[in-house]
Image (cartoon, grey):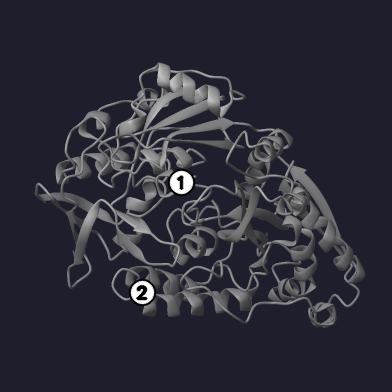
Amino acid sequence: MNIQWNRRLSFASLATALLIAGFALAQQPQGLAAFASPSTLPDLDPSTGFSSENAVMANVYETLTFYTVDGTVIPKLAADWEIAEDGLSWTFTLREGVTFHDGSPLTAAAVKASLERTIELGLGAAFIYFPVASIEVVDDLTVRFNLNYQAPMDLILSSGYAAWIMSPTAVTQEGAWFNAGNGSGTGPYIIESYSPGENLVLRAFPDYWGGWSENQFGTVVIDIIEEPTLREQMIRSGETDFTFNLPFDSYPALSRLTDVVVDRTPSFQMLYGLLNTRKAPLNNPTVRRALAYSFPYDLVTENLYGGLGSPAVGAVPSGMWGALTEGGASYDPERARHLLSEAGYPDGGFELLFTYAAGDLEEQLVGELWRADLADLGVDLQIQGLTWEAQWDLAKSDPATAQDIFTMYWWPTYITPYDFLFSMFHSEDEPFFNLSYYSNPDFDTLIDSADALSGTSREEAADRFREAQRILNGDAAAIFMVEVPDVHVIRSDIRGYINNPAYPHVVFWHDLSR
């Protein structure tokens, strides 16, 4: 069956079309759902996709382990696992009776082939496998990961990027095959059709190991609707069931509707202002600490994201294991003034360049709100919007001529504080994402040792990650501006939706019904 339809086709006419096509509704989940996505699907190759296509990947493919909303890691395609005493090998026993969409069985050899394809391509999030020395097939349902150094393989293998398991047939294909709308995973859905830039249709996989009931969704339509006004109209009218990334001033009115739910939950995404520690005057840590106390945290939280953002305490989002719960900077302009005077700038008298991604109104607003407070301290904040590429190139070229404050968002590849702390603050010979050019050997040692411990002693690892963040706060290498909320809009007759920030903006349709 290969049905194409206009995104405005009504649910009733679509159901009729499916019946005409011979879709056996009596033997399949009968529901139809629609998702208005603000983003295109850049790369449907499960080895290399590293963006918004995770909304498809998480329904077509599965991972060995799964990170839950309550912060635990549970079995998915792996039934259980054990860790060697030295932490250098992890052995996973696979779930029995699982088949891929092409009918082949899930085996250890299929897992090995899937992940080795990802490692060998070396694209997207393949870097998460740096600790892996080899993948070993022990028997049909047992696979072992031998490591170069201790690492949390349960977390790595639950990643929403690069951890997907595909069939032996799919492993042999090129990226173009996947991006034509083909694929073969173990997930609850198969890609029925794909029109790039327009829509993608998911159809229930009849032999899904998780089983089906009639009230689940047998068909899911993902419409690519980049215009936010149109997406808002669609969710209001019932033409779609789920969307996000609407203008924040639209949420109060949407919240008053009885047939729509605005679901706001914390995310693992934060907005940072990385301070140039190599360039005067920000090469002086006292000046950087003054800036940390000058930042209007509450004002930003109240004015950004419709007042739905949360204040940040440290570099790691508050809902993640290893996050700080207290001790961050707060808005204190008098203390900022005192620190500037202590640093030799009693009247300010210097200029700072603040760059943001052109078109990002939230980042721009942050700069404008902060500029007024800095002006009171005699500091002139110049705000400049650049394309992401131009902003990043400027920061990587030469710290002596780079911007003073680089604003950017960060969210993790898999759920560990190390993703934040290593990527943005670990010492680098050449700048990549450490765009504050921060270097502190004690900090590096703490986070590296915490990462090694996170597979075998997560509580001890969490303590070390928190201690590293206290060092980072003391050195004021960055302004931790705001924790970005996840805000999703859902039709109120959808049952079972729970946002999981470990898989950004993913709807696990198998969990839902109408």
Where residue 455 appears, as percent x and y from the top left, is 31, 68
**Residue at the outermost front position:** 26
What SS does tag 2 mark? helix
Name which quarter of the figure residue 300 lies in. bottom right
Q: Quadrant of the N terminus?
A: top left
**Who's the residue at 60% across and 48% down the image?**
396
Q: Is residue 5 visible?
A: yes
Label disc, if present, on residue 513 of the rendered structure: 1
Residue type, label 2: Arg
How far apart are the alpha carbons under marks 1 and 2? 36 Å
Label disc, if present, on residue 412 of the rendered structure: none
**Who's the residue at 46% across and 42% down the image?**
54
| Residue that carries the numbered disc 2 in the rendered image | 458
Q: For this view, does 205 lie left or right of residue 335?
A: left
Q: Marks 1 and 2: which is nearer the front?
A: 1
Q: Which of marks 1 and 2 is nearer the N terminus?
A: 2
